[in-house]
Image (spheres, rainbow, N blue to C red):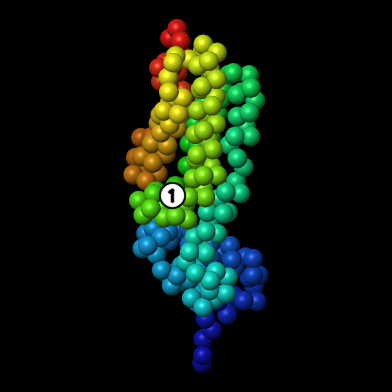
Amino acid sequence: MATRSPERAGRSRISGPERRDRILQAAVACFASRGFSGTTTREVAERAGITEAGLYRHFESKEVLYAAIIDAKMQAPDLLADLAGPAERGDDRALLAGLAQAILERGRADPDFVRILFFSALEGHELADPFFEARTRRLRDFLARYIARRVDEGAFRDVDPLLAASAFIGMVVDHVNVAVVFGREELRRRSPHELAEGLVDLFLSGVQRGR
């Protein structure tokens, strides 16, 4: 007696959008484990429980599938929206702690995407550029402009704003990478709030005048 393929068996139960989401979830897991270059569409299809031909009905290539993942992640709320208030008030601690805690929480909530971005950087994959431009660069430039303003106001020492912004974000992202990519549990035992406050203390001790 002939058996039906996993895709055909579930066709009556799974809608097109649901199947597309299942493929994306499978692709995230595969790309996070082996990177873009090390992942094949056949592996993604097998993980999603469909045929490779079924995958191509939703995504015409591995590049299109990868781009869909990046696009989906860019739909997440922008961190800058929550930082506008503290920035306007000149509340250094609230702005920096809010930024750090949000990055740490997102890293813990979505470790697979952290690994995908790590692989993308190592592979020099151009499909990660839109995410960097839309999120990472905008965040760094926003913080650099804030630091430059605080230098002009006399609240911060005469530091290089872009270098200082990169240093602060680098401290935070390093914790995410060490905890997620390298799996260091000692960092995961501390809450994002506790880690954020500690990092802000270190940063402000170096840039604020009178400290």
Q: Determine the residue located farthest toward the top in the rendered image.
A: 210
Name the residue located 41 percent from the left edge and 68 percent from the top edge.
Answer: 40
Q: Determine the residue located farthest toward the bottom in the rendered image.
A: 1
Report which quarter residue 204 is drawn in: top left
Q: Which residue is labeled 1 in the image?
A: 117
Q: Name the spot of residue 130 as percent of width and height, x first.
A: 52, 50
Report which quarter residue 173 is drawn in: top left
Q: Is residue 104 left or right of residue 17?
A: left
Question: Quadrant location of the C terminus?
Answer: top left
Name the residue located 63 percent from the left edge and 34 percent from the top edge.
Answer: 81
Q: Is residue 148 above or below residue 21?
A: above
Q: Name the spot of residue 2 as percent of width and height, x first.
A: 51, 90
The total of numbered circles placed on residues is 1
Q: Residues within 10 Å of mark 1 (few under 14, many from 20)?
A: some
Q: Is residue 107 above or below residue 162?
A: below
- SS of the residue at dot 1? helix
Name the residue located 48 percent from the left edge and 15 percent from the top edge.
Answer: 156
Task: Report if residue 7 is visible in the image.
Answer: yes
Q: Name the spot of residue 192 as percent of width and height, x first.
A: 48, 32
Report which quarter residue 12 is drawn in: bottom right
Task: Name the one closer to the observer, 211 or 134.
Answer: 134
Task: Name the one closer to the observer, 4 or 200.
Answer: 200
Name the residue located 47 percent from the left edge and 42 percent from the top edge.
Answer: 107
Which three-letter amino acid code belongs to the residue tagged 1? Answer: Leu
Q: Is residue 115 above or below residue 94?
A: below
Task: Report if residue 25 is visible in the image.
Answer: no
